[in-house]
Image (cartoon, coloured by chain):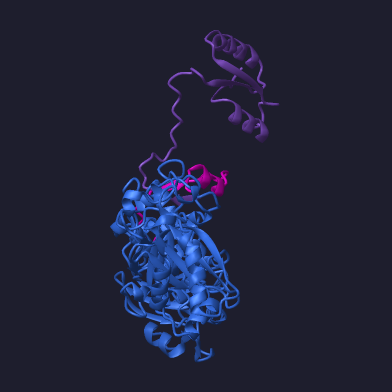
Chain colours: A purple, B blue
Amino acid sequence: MELLDPTSERSPLKRPRRAPPGSLDGLTVGLLDISKARGDIFLDRVEALLSARGVAVKRYKKPTFTRPAPNDLGQKIASEVDVVIEGLAD
Amino acid sequence: MSATAGIREGYVVVAKRDCPTCVLVEPVLAELARSTQPLTVFSQDDPTFPATVPGVRDDRALEASFRLRIETVPTLIKLEGGREVGRLVGWQRDEWRALTGLNSLGEGLPDWRPGCGSKSVEPGVIDELEVKYGEVKFAARRVDIDEHEDEAEAMHARGWSDGLPLVPPTPVRVHRMLKGTKRDPAEVIGNVPPDLAPVTVEKIAVNAVMAGCKPEYLPVVIAAVEAALMEPFAMHGVLATTMFCGPIVIVNGPKARAIGMNARGNALGQGNRANATIGRALQLVIRNVGGGRPQEVDRSALGHPGKYTFCFAEDEEGSCWEPLSVERGFAPGASTVTLFAGDGVHGVVDQQSRTPESLARSFALTLRSVNHWKLAQSGDAILVVSPEHERTFREAGWNKARLRQELDRLLMLPAEEMVRGAGGIAEGIPATALADKKRIPKFRQGGLLIVRAGGSAGMFSAVIAGWGASGAMGSSPVTREITE
């Protein structure tokens, strides 16, 4: 479907990514394991590195990498952390 | 494809199987096909029809019908050197014979049969063809929504919505919307705050589509945008304030009736498309063109539900009172929008008063509460008088001016009650501002609007409080004539 833009067209047609935070100080980082093989090994290492820098970490896991995350998992992550690191490939 | 559908010589016939007259002339078309002149037949619904003619051109997409401006089928057109030199619609034997020079054409057929409507001019179709094949150009950039993406979700995701579902602004819908005004789609109406982005008639139409407007509402929406951009209305401040207010639209004049606006039962409530969508369209223009969004430049602490939409018409037909538009200097019979920076609705219940004096006192009590009982000269107000309350004034011969005069008198408030600290309440008017005044008027001059609206039963009126920064320091009500 083709729509006409209702805005002042001052922002690009493709939505820009949200700017990453300048620092992780005081933020909580979520680590999302999508249930792909060896994702846990990658995320364990990331957790160790973040924890060593004093950054708070929370771990999450999708039931399967073949489907989008369940709604309640997405809402839980959004309400608990500021930044998410996802292990996408094996 | 050119205006003659790419054909330069001979005869062109546009027909459809679904038309009895087209079926009737099938043998005529066969006769024409056998003549020395080239014949091109376009079929609007079935390329196997008419079977008597070889090489029928499939015009189910209706492009040739549109280019040839066909309104009736069958249509017979004669072309010479790429120029149309004759056109007949329906079946008229003598005229078909005269145009073709074939004197035995249609022997045995009735003399005359009317044609049928062309598929290219069926309701809605012409708008689609104008966008698809015509010269309709849009300045707005096009946003492609993937076929597997839900367009309603896509619009929300792009931040275009006030929170409620939107009608997708497709080029055809925007084209139809623009037919609601005679104004040039490229006309710039002004710069919309807070971003001060220029807004054209076309951009307003895009947002009016999304809001759910019908094309005939568009002139009212444009007038509302024009009013919002008038300097005294201070739209930037109305948006940016931490107080409650949003633009409230009051429509006067024949346009309100023509587009079916509600001025009667539940006038300030839900259920009428024009009321609901005109107010919403204005807010969507401010959101999408101006960039005015809650928790961004819209700093309202609480807002109010009327910031989705708040638009109604004054009930002029049943009223003995001068319409708001006339009070504000417009000719009787002019259609106008008045914008007021206002809060929500505060009901005035008075089922006992039968004299104008008593009812005016009831009104004054509620009007005193605008913004705060101990504040004055800050917020304007609208008093919406219902028919059963207006009756009391009408029977006593009180016009709007007389009622306003009485309210002004009743709302000369005692300074000792208004001063900061009085009544054990820190809020109030600073003693220095009161100086030695014994009384202070609640409203500034011109700060109280009175309109009549509502259902025929119910002794209830309403007060709509204005922004606490009303008047020259902030927002003043503005009125703009609606032009088609």
Q: Quadrant of the C terminus of chain B?
A: bottom left
Confirm whether the magenta stretch covers residue B154.
yes
Confirm whether the magenta stretch covers residue B484.
no
Provide residue B132's location: percent of width, then percent of height: 43, 59
Provide residue B352's location: percent of width, then percent of height: 60, 75
Q: From which residue to which does the magenta span run?
A: B132-160
Q: Which residue is found at the position 55% from the left and 49% from the top?
A: B152
Q: Which residue is found at the position 66% from the left and 35% from the top?
A: A71
* Residue B199 image-quadrant placement: bottom left
Provide residue B299's location: percent of width, then percent of height: 43, 43
In the figure, A74 relative to A10: above or below?
above
Q: Quadrant of the N terminus of chain B?
A: bottom left
Provide residue B411's location: percent of width, then percent of height: 42, 65
Q: Which residue is found at the position 43% from the left and 38% from the top?
A: A14
Whether residue B190 sits left or right of residue B265 in the image: it is left
Given residues B118 and B153, the one toward you in this image is B153
Given residues A10 and B450, the one toward you in this image is B450
